[in-house]
Every structure is written in structure tokens, then in C-alpha cells.
Image: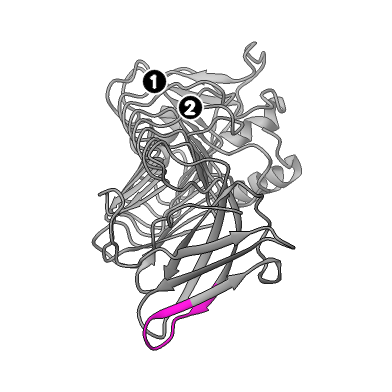
Amino acid sequence: MKLATIVLASLLLATVASAGLYTVTTTDDSGPGSLRDGILAANTRVICDSPCYIVFNLPPPVPPSGWFTIRPQSPLPVLAGWRAVIDGHSQTLATGDTNPLGPEIELDGEDAGLAPGLKIHFNSSAGIFGMAINRFGGNGVVIEGGDSNRVGPNPYAPIESQPSNYIGVDPTGTRALPNGYNGVLLIRTFSPRIEHNLISGNRGNGIFGVELRDGMIIGNAIGTGNADDIELGNGVNGIDMNGSTKFGGVITIAQNRIAYNGASGIATQPATTLVSVTGNTIFRNALMSLDVGHDGVSPNSIQPPLLTFANTIGSFNVHGVLHAAPSTNVHVELFASSDRTPLGLAEGRRFLGAFDIRTDTRGEARFDVDRRNGISDAASGEFVAATATTIAAGTSELSDPLRVQ
């Protein structure tokens, strides 16, 4: 994984000075220098004081595959040490970028039973960075309780071209090695951040959330491989926020690429916790691109816009009308696709742009938008569709697809 080595080196030096550091030096399942021992050290604060930073320095020779594989023989301990971090990116400092397609550290759970791969339990500001996590009998990653926990890139290093964690696939991001349930499971946690991961091939959902308050799911590839034409999918939905019904706040789902999943791309349940869906690319999922309510195409708390006309005469422009609460600000996003879902519904293959509009005292707003509104062109014959988002109601399903004339 190509990272800024000098940035990571500076981070590790700062970590040694201000917190605990545990270095994984063996792929053995247990004992000194093992990942298992590092998690126990972070939890007990005996060998590695809090916050404990677990890094990797596995010695050469590098396996012919280009990555090191750790195979737990039983469930790993939960990561309960306050602000503890497991950082697979750090192996690059020791042996270089030996796997240009993905992480240098693989966690293979084939022999670990039905447990999850890694679990952050009632913790705050903990993190999992730069790991391939596959073939566990349970979920790939679990975050239960706590707040501000992160699965993604090291926040102190730049985001590079490759995703951070590979969950449900091999370290090249080209072959599915399923975890038994969801790729990432979020349970009763506040403000988690799931960012810039590859989450595909899992038997359940890519990401499943239960009773969340706030949170961000940003920039992930969910269902694809290392390229959009690699069809790995997840067994159910790409992202399922069905359980987010208790605590309030807003879950932001933005700039993800979601494709080839066994049910819908994104499924949400209107509830106390609002879900804002913005700027995603969603295509080739078996059911719907965006299902609000887990009930197929249906009336929701916010209706999608009705697109009435789209053409490319002179320049591309779209006309439509939307209905929401009276005198309400509405954020509208437009998408284009060359095809529709297997059910004939809209896809969001290409994000065209967005604009904001306000309904009148009757709750209606008409629009006519083009390049002057920051909207990219769609080609004649393509289908366009739209979503509507309000602060009070979250995001609608995609509108009916309209073919560009």
C-alpha cells in the first residue's frame, strides 16, 4: 500500500513519546510479538499503556504473495483498550510496498470459529487501519458501543489510491473470501466513521447499522473489487441502516461506490436517526439502488422528485417538480445511467451534480437546471433520476428513471 513513509514515521515517533507502542513481530497466533498479545497488552495497559498503538514490523523474507498472513486458531480478544489502534499500514515502513494492490497484513479467520475478525468494544477513538480481514465465521469488523471509532485510513497519513481495509476479499481486492455475516457491524455506537475501505464478498450486508447516533460512511467501495468491473458483491444489501431507530442524529452516506449486491445498494428505515445519502455511485444491485423503508418502491416521509423532461438540445437540461413540507429547503441530486435495475428502476451510476431549492407555501417547487447550476451533461438515450433530501426527513428513494431525449 503506497503511503507517505515520512508522515507515518513521524507519527510513530510521536506515538512512542506520548503513548504506548506494541510491535507485532510474528505471524504466530499467540505469544510475545503476536497480534493477540498486542490486543491483550492494549486492554490491560501493562505492556502497552493507553492509548496503545499496535504496529507491525514482521521481518523479511516477505512471502511470495507480497503480504503476511495471520491465522488465529480461536477468537481474538475484543479491542477494549481506550483509544487503541491496530495499524496494518505500518508494515510498509518495515518491508516497503510489497503488495501494490492492497494491504501487507492479512487476517485470515478460517480456523477461528464463528467469532468476528476484529471487535472494538465500548471504546472511544479506537481504530483499525490497513488490514485485509476475511474468512471469519462471524462479522468481519464489529464496533459495539463507544464513540468516534474509525475503520479506514490512518487519519494522520494521506489517503492514497488504494482503499485502507479490505473486508471480505483477498489482499489484492480481486477475489471474494467471505466473512460469514456482515463486513462491518455497527451496534449502539455514536459517531463511527467508516471511510475509504473495500467491503465486498461478505455473506451478509457490506455494512449493517443497529441503533446509531450520527456517523459517517464515506468513500468506500462496497460490492466491487479493486476496479468497478470486478463483481464481488455482498450477499444482502451494500449498506443497511434498518436498525438506526433509537438515538437521533444524522448518518451521512456519501461518495461511496456500491454495486453488485444481492439485494439493494442502500436500504434505510425512516426513524429518529436520519440518513442523508449524497454523492454516491450506485449501480447493478439486484433490487433497488436506494430502498427507504425496506418495503420496495413505496411512499416515504419525503417523496422523490418527479422528472418531467430531459434533453440535450443546445445543452443538457432537466425539468421537474418536487413536493415536501411547505417553505422547506430541499437538496436535490441528479444521476445518470445507461441502464436500469433488473426491476426496471433507476440507477445512480454517475453523479451529475446537485442544487438546492425551496418549496413554496403549498409545499411545491419546480425546477429547470443545466450547466449553469453546476450539472454535468448526460447523453441522449441515457436515463436520469433524482433524490431529494431535507434536514427533517432525510433522503428519498431515487425517482422514476427518465430517458434523455
- In which quadrant will I find the C terminus? bottom right
Residue 208, given in percent of the width and then of the height, sits at 34, 44
The secondary element bearing badge 2 is classed as loop
Reading the image, the residue beneath label 2 is 232
Q: Tell me the residue at 50%/76% (across/down).
A: 366
> Which residue range is magenta in the image?
356-365
The vertical placement of 148 against 89, above or below, is below
Residue 360, given in percent of the width and then of the height, sits at 43, 86
The secondary element bearing badge 1 is classed as loop
- What residue type is disc 2 on? Leu
Q: Tell me the residue at 74%/63% (across/down).
A: 314
- What residue type is disc 1 on? Pro
Q: Residues within 10 Å of mark 1 (few under 14, many from 20)?
A: many
The vertical placement of 374 against 293, above or below, is below
Residue 351, given in percent of the width and then of the height, sits at 59, 53
Which of the numbered marks, if any, corresponds to residue 395?
none
Which of the numbered marks, if any, corresponds to residue 72?
1
Please state the total of marks drawn on the protein image: 2
Of mark 1 and mark 2, the one earlier in the sequence is 1
Q: Is residue 100 visible?
A: yes
